[in-house]
Image: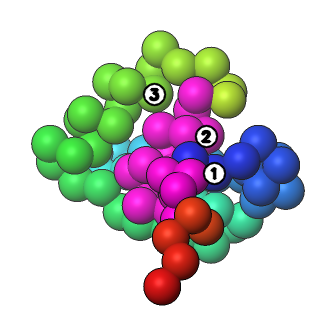
Amino acid sequence: MPDNESLAKHPFSYQRSKDGVVRIFRSNHLATTLREKSALRFLSKISFANEENSQLIMAKATGQYKFGNENDRRE
């Protein structure tokens, strides 16, 4: 998961259009676009989330998160 410091410096935001498309931004740059079922799932999750959890939901939706064990892998 992204750390809280990274999310504070470069937060996610989203916009919902009238046609149901959801656009997720990070630092005012488009990160991903969700349509149809993906957009509906995202909106249902985020509607009950606080600010911190909202950031994590948006990070997962964009694929811009880490599991935390990447640095442990040494090749």
Which residue is pictured at 50% across the width and 70% down the height? 73
| Circle 1: residue type | Pro
Which residue is pictured at 53% across the width and 19% down the height? 49
Say what secondary structure mark 3 lies in. helix
Going by the image, does 30 lie left or right of 36? right
| Circle 2: residue type | Gln
Say what secondary structure mark 1 lies in. loop
Which residue is pictured at 69% across the width and 66% down the height? 28
Q: Which mark is residue 46?
A: 3
Question: Pointers 2 and 1 in contact (CB under 8 A)?
Answer: yes
Give neighbour class at mark 2: few <14, some 14-19, many 20+ (Cα, 10 Å).
many
Going by the image, does 33 lie left or right of 26? left
Chain-order first, disc 3 or disc 1: 1
Q: Is residue 36 visible?
A: yes
Outermost residue, left side:
37
Identify the residue position indicated by label 2 in the image.
55
C-alpha separation, residue under disc 3 versus residue under disc 1: 17 Å
| Circle 3: residue type | Ile
| Residue 23 percent across, percent down from the top left | 44, 57
Determine whether 42 is above or below 69 in the image: above
